[in-house]
Amino acid sequence: MAPRPARAAAAGVSLPLLLWLVWALLAGGCGERPVAGAPITLVFKHAKILGPADPVPGLLRRFEADHPGVRVQSEALTWSSDEQHQFYVINLEGGSPPFDVMMLDVIWVPEFARAGWILDLTPSVAPAERDAHFPSAIEPAMQDGRLWALPWFMNVGLLYYRADLLAKYGFRPPETYDELIEQVRRIRAGERDPTLDGYLWQGKQYEGGMVNVLEALWANGARLLDDAGRPFPEAERAREALAFLRGLIESGVSPPWVTAGDEELTRRPFGDGRAIFLRGWPYALDLFELPDSRVRGKVGVAPIPRLRHGPVGAASTGGAHLAVSARTRHAALAVELARFLTSETAQRAMTEGAALRPSRPALYRDAGLIARDPSLPALHGLMLRGHPRPITPYYLMLSTTLQPEFSAVLVGRKSPERAMQDAGAQVQHLLRSVTP
Amino acid sequence: MSDRRLAWLLLSPALLVLGTLTVYPALWVLWLALQYRIPVFGISRWAGLEHFAFLAVDTRFWNAAWVTGVFTVASVALEGALGLAIAVALRGQRGGRRTALALLLLAWALPSVVTAKMFEWLYHPAGGLVNFLLGGRAINWLGDPAFALPSLILADVWRATPFVALLCYARLLTIPPDLYEAAEVDGAAGLQAFTRITWPLVRPILLVTLLFRTLDAIRAFDIMFVLTGGGPAGSTESLTVYAYRALFQTLQIGFGSAIGVVVFALVMLVAVLYLRVIGRQEAAA
């Protein structure tokens, strides 16, 4: 019996060994071994940037010009956020990732930091450089008091309204949801158009749905977790917020299909002039103002309204950060690249060339940029009021665990009380797994 | 003694394969299920039965168990009834049997992911054939919690009925026609011939077929995953989808394995029950 475990162990070892051999052969054959004089290649992994002109290639050539002997290769990520995350997890957990600088969704930074996949940028980034970004963009990049990523561009939730319709009925943009509901009722009664919807938002079971629920909680002064990680510290307010979202559908202020609506599914009907209000991200503004848009010149932006107990404009922030792989072979250069791409110069180019908003407040006061994008001053106020989503390495676990419960409330399968109870039990089990 | 040895020798390749491919992973999953394991965060510690204790009170788990149960019972019952009916009809058919068989096989031969994708288009609220055939209604088959699970069951029935039909048909072909002729002479025809001759002879093979289908249905994953992803609001989240979410989306290897163990136990239990019924039947025959 004695030799058996040894043999089993040998069998267990042989597969990694084999893989290592294959890797060694491949790496020996075509790997980029630093040869004296040969250029260093940095790989920058990021999602494709949409907009009138992709500014990234130009910025990379500029970085190359400033750093002779360095080549930056830009590689595109897949579209969906879930797939991007999966790609990173597989490559980073698997060993040597084939990239140096990577774009991260803001909600992943603490997770990647805790997993040890990204470099601590604290020593390379001076406090002044850090403070040049919105606090709500820096906070989610912090973990254990260290800085792990730099903000690249930023998003904030906002309320789009049909300025022409509101003006026609003598309304100002609503500050409370009660006003919004009243305006929807009056405008729809006056327009007598059965195809005109009231308020569109994202209720699908995905991260965007989670954002909408969080905003409803904040709008009523409720949090998802308290500082100790206990769910729904303000239980009654949270219940009201969830009941309010379901009520929007039951009362017909929002069409039933918002429970399956994501950003684009809700942006399109509003862009076709078939809704009065829309909760969205800033990128939609550029699309509404395109020459062939049906709502061109008729759209206004306002802070997210409030419920009874919360503040106006308690919107979720979002956006992308740049981090450096912990396994990069050119750490100093990779950090340089991340700092350059998030610099004021680069963010200005991003704002000009792509439909993205910077994470640096100074650029919102830049006369040249405002001339191109008149919405910047308004967005500045919205960005300042924005909240990051809960900052924890376990955010994604938390969010995917909670999404089905919230979705069940929105479609009317569960009462808010019931969903909160079930969600609370699951969150507690999750936290028991991750806290020793 | 040497016979016994030979027997073991001849069995050893099969045992070895079963051991490495089935027993070893099963034991490993059981071992993982007793731990908190989240490799991404370097978490690995003993949990004992805590995952199972949580599952016992986890409403999401019981919802998933309910979805799995409804899906399994409904789809297997429909597949059994329809499959048998098709087999009997095929046997009575004079021309075109080959064509009918080929068409049946087509549905069964498609990978279930492809079937699921096809049904995704059939069920599309705006451009789907199903709504078109219903007179241009706009029923959101996969998006409405009331319709989603029945829609999945229908897709599974479409795919798996041919399997039941073909096996039953094969059995029907082996029933000697003189049995029916003799019955007819004795005045038993139509329904009586079915209940007295066809049913008792086809029942054993039908049971084995349904055993296969039941085990497949309990473990079904691709249809839910492709068509609804478990939504809307968890109304189609089966145990396998829940296990997938825990294992691959939130990377809770320990907890996900615990769900896997439950599915495994369920499959074993159902298999044992079926085998008992089949065994009793054989004893009675």
Image (cartoon, coloured by chain):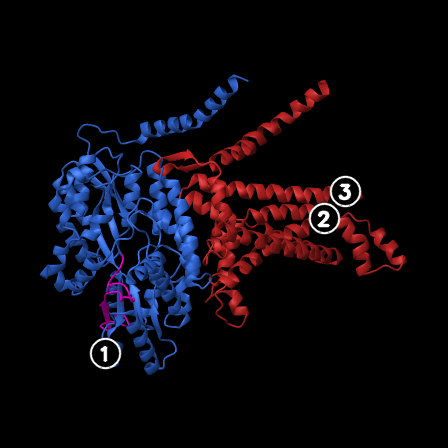
Chain colours: A blue, B red
Magenta segment = A292-316
Q: Amino acid at mark 1?
A: Ala
From the image, tell me which residue sits under label 2: B170
Which residue carries the number 3 mark? B282
Residues at marks 3 and 2 on the same chain:
yes
* B241 sits left or right of A107 in the view: right
Instruction: Quote the CA–CA distance across marks 3 and 1.
Output: 82 Å
In the picture provided, is A278 more to the left or to the right than A69? right
- Under tag 3, what secondary structure? helix
Q: Say which chain tag 3 marks.
A: B
- Residue A305 forms part of the magenta stretch: yes
Q: Are marks 3 and 2 in contact (CB under 8 Å)?
A: no
Which residue has dot 1 on it?
A167
Query: Spatial distance from mark 1 to mark 2, Cα to Cα?
Result: 75 Å
* Both marks 3 and 1 on one chain: no
Could you tell me which quadrant the C terminus of chain B lies in? top right
Q: Secondary structure at mark 2?
A: helix
Considering only vertical position in the picture, is A40 above or below B77? above
Residue type for callout 2: Ala
Q: Main secondary structure of the magenta part?
A: loop
Mark closer to the observer (3, 2): 3
Q: Residue B258: x and y, percent?
A: 49, 41
